[in-house]
Image: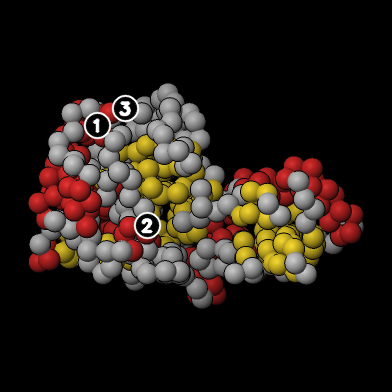
Amino acid sequence: MEITANQLQLVNKQIKRLIDCQNFYGRKLKEAGVDQLASKEDFEKLPFSEKDDLRECYPLGLMACPEEEVVRIHSSSGTTGTPVIIPYTRKDVEDWAIMFKRCYELAGITNKDRIHITPGYGLWTAGIGFQAGCELLGAMAIPMGPGNTEKQLQMMMDLKSTVLCATSSYALLLAEEIAKRGIKDKIHLTKGVIGSERWGEKMRKRIREELGIELYDIYGLTEIYGPGIGVNCKYDTGMHIFDDYLYTEIIDPETGKVLPDGEWGEIVITTLVKEGAPLIRYRTHDLSRIIPGNCPCGRTYPRLDVIAGRSDDMMKIKGVNVFPKQIEEILASFPELSSEYQIRISHLEGKDTMRIYVETNGTVDFLDIARRIAEKVKSRIGFTPLVKVVELGVLPRSEKKSKRVIDERF
């Protein structure tokens, strides 16, 4: 995807803002000898930025405006390392709400809907973003936040919620609880706006069928406003990304080279109008591709494919590079299994060991399916894991993001 003349002009304004304010980014750009950009080639010479760079700015080293213009801060949801603090101006908050409103509209949601919001509130960007977009749309916000599933289901029935906003893990948990209680006929949901974590086709199918709803992928990250910077439409041909606010590139995660549309790589985002903490060529580590061509809906926003994983998700086991998505694809080929799994990596008796926990119902031979899974992993990846089969519902469910890979070596 080529950067347009208008986008390049906006990037130049951001560069001037950053250098003038002399924040972390401004100093980095000045040291790199960056001034004004005249072409795509100039832009692609700009240095990347990463989360570790942002951590070095803790607490407010990213601020690119006078402090009196900051109306809110948010922090990334990661649980390790120094937090990343992102300041927002009033315009940043308004722009984010506008993008989120677009997401709801792209999903066919209107001001007649009742939007049940389960993502967390607070320093994390999730819940408040879903609510701001909902209120700008003029729909009824039901700001539940995570947890208390009993209360969630009661409010869902009593208030006749029509849209569920959740992580895929919590949407699945709610679907299972609704089925367990036999209350599906009392639930009025028609759509689900799901984000925050990668989720495979098997999980999508279960949520879609068990709740009887249309599903929409929403994309975003705290460093770049939060969720709501893109979503798929009813044609489900990829997530539309709002290019009047963001410029998106796909790079080879190893070389940093920009890849042509259609090729899979790492998403890199530049904020075009953000005031509180503009980011230039920010490496998200999310893996996707820009889908070539136009969407049947007629909108001209660039489209990202589903998030296939993260470039920093790679596990090294017995000298072999393994991505969780590879294991997920193998498990998805077994119709007897549920969508839930867990990978545990440990170091026992001087060697690395991978244990894969999977769920199935009681109608299959646990030993036989464990053997077949192990053989398929061996043939595709090159080593034999230990496979443990458990009954449906045994693996933990999460109200936030499910932790599917646990590395016990460190």
Instruction: Indicate left or right for 5 with 327 as reference.
Output: left
The image shows residue 42, relative to residue 18, as above or below, that is above
Give the structural element (helix, strand or loop) at label 1: helix
Res 37 seen here? yes
Q: Distance between the residues labelled 1 and 2?
A: 23 Å
In the foreground, 340 or 318: 318
Image quadrant in which you'd find residue 45: top left
Instruction: Indicate left or right for 181 with 366 as reference.
Output: left
Nearer the observer: mark 3 or 1; the answer is 1
Count residues near mark 1 (Cα–Cα under 10 Å), then give few for <14, some for 14-19, many for 20+. Answer: few
Kind of residue indicated by mark 3 = Glu
Give the structural element (helix, strand or loop) at label 2: helix
Count residues near mark 3 (Cα–Cα under 10 Å), then give few for <14, some for 14-19, many for 20+. Answer: few
Count residues near mark 2 (Cα–Cα under 10 Å), then give few for <14, some for 14-19, many for 20+. Answer: some
Give the structural element (helix, strand or loop) at label 3: loop
Q: Residue at x 27, y 53 (%)?
A: 97
In the foreground, 390 or 194: 390
Earlier in the chain: of badge 3 and badge 2, it is 3
The image shows residue 77, relative to residue 193, as above or below, that is below
Q: Residue at x 48, y 41 (%)?
A: 254
Image quadrant in which you'd find residue 11: top left
Q: Residue at x 29, y 58 (%)?
A: 132
Kind of residue indicated by mark 1 = Asp
Percent across and percent down for residue 169 are 56, 60
Nearer the observer: mark 3 or 2; the answer is 2
Q: Where is mark 2, residue-wise?
A: 51
Q: Distance between the residues labelled 3 and 1?
A: 13 Å
Percent across and percent down for residue 62 are 23, 60
